[in-house]
Amino acid sequence: MRLAERMNFLGGEGMGDVLTQVQQRRARGERVIPMHAGEPDFDTPTDIVEAAVAALRGGQTHYTPAAGIPALRQAIAEEISKTRRITVSPDQVVVAPGVKPLIFFTMAALCQPGDDVICPDPAYPFYASLANFVGAKAVSLPLTMDTGFSIDFALLEDLVTPNTRLVVVNSPSNPTGAILTRGELEALGDIVLKHDLWILSDEIYSRLVYEDSFESIASVPGMSERTVLIDGFSKTYAMTGWRLGYSVTPRELTPHITKLVLNTLSCSVAFTQPAAVEALRGSQEPVHRMIETFRRRRDRLVSGINRIPGLACLKPRGAFYAFTKVSGVDKPSLELARYLLTEAGVAVYPGAAFGSQGEGFLRLSFACSEADIDEGLERIAGALARL
């Protein structure tokens, strides 16, 4: 079969490998400690589920407007206006089945062959693969543990060329848990304004912060006109399987994102959208309880990791991952992740899945029970001791 050359740009290796092996082992009845999880291990709150059931029973099973039902776009506009301290109207909002399509549509709408997209490294791997897929070139912005995985702004400016079109920001970060401070966002804004760039700000973990208050690049003066803000319901409301994300863009860009939704997805699922309205406007108590649980698990996991010889990690300030440095082991991170799954029955993601700067790291998730954390760390320590 002859495939289009662009298919070679799609990544995901490492993550897919772990998922396949976990599924195979579970199908054989083996117990696997799920420290790879990229989703909350909580059920969707009952009021959200009931809103979807009511929508189904009320006949909301047909096409909706491509950009989302008016009630949801209004609720999102109000939420973003309040939490990001900017003025947003519903005609700036586009709803889609998850965040990934909106990352893709943003790059497809703004970038073309010859353009550069600066992507953090390590980072969610699909930023770079989708940038390359649309014909642009992903440019790595290295982030290091020595600096707390924060941006080196002198290096960022060195990477900017006349071809640079877009800079990707993910705060809180997957996989590092780092959060950009207000001062860092302002420094980033200065560079963006100086060089006439766009920002794609993936804020899917914006509610999952543990010490600091979340700040959005869109709230920096002059940046809302240059920012595509992307968020969704999957992490905050334990709605990964519902597939609902949204973008907030300058008004002139919204019709183009909507056109891409219409031409590829038609629309988001009808009965999930009233449920998303309930998520935003209903009780936030389940979210607060989940965050407190994650905070306790984070502290337990980080403390346990740093007691294991050869492992070290910083305390993540957001999201639910501990990006863990591995020393004294002569294995690439993908081989080490396979070894831990095979020999210890613990699923983790290799750092190299998140970019070249992730080599030598493992991503451990605390979206699992405290009992799983304790058992997983015990198994990992034993397996490493046998190497």
Image (cartoon, rainbow, N blue to C red):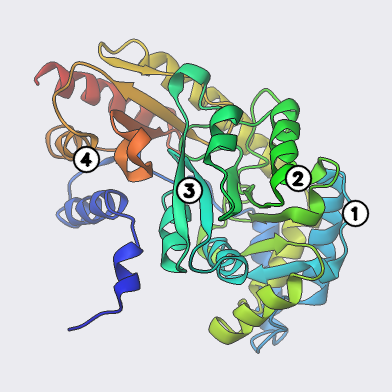
Q: Residues within 10 Å of mark 3 (few under 14, many from 20)?
A: some
Which of marks 3 and 2 precedes in the sequence? 3
Q: Which residue is mark 3?
A: 39
Q: Nearer the viewer, residue 325 or 69?
A: 325
Question: What kind of residue is marked 4?
Answer: Leu
What residue is rendered at 61% in x and 79% in y? 260
Please report whichever mark, 3 or 4, sits nearer to the chain's N-terminal start. Answer: 3
Query: What residue sits right under mark 2 in the picture?
Result: 193
Q: Of circles 3 and 4, which is in front?
A: 4
The answer to whether the residues at label 2 and label 3 have Cβ atoms under 8 Å apart is: no
**Amino acid bearing label 2:** Leu
Residue 261 image offset from top left, x and y in percent: 61, 78
Q: Which residue is mark 4?
A: 334
Please name the amino acid that badge 3 sits on: Glu
Residue under the image location 72 percent in, 57 percent down:
279
Of labels 2 and 1, the one closer to you: 2
Relative image position of residue 77 (x, y in whole percent)? 83, 60
Amino acid of disc 1: Thr
Q: Earlier in the sequence, mark 1 or mark 4?
A: 1
Height in image: 52 above or below 296?
A: below
Mark 2 / mark 1, whichever is N-terminal = 1
Q: Picture coordinates of residue 295 (x, y %)?
A: 57, 26
Label 2: state its secondary structure.
helix
**Looking at the image, do the residues carrying marks 4 and 2 touch, with CB atoms under 8 Å apart?**
no
Give the number of the mark in front: 3 or 1: 1
Task: Provide residue 154's location: percent of width, then percent of height.
Answer: 59, 28
Cα–Cα span, label 2 and label 3: 35 Å
User: Residue 337 sits in which quadrant?
Assistant: top left
Residue positioned 66% across, 88% down in the render: 63
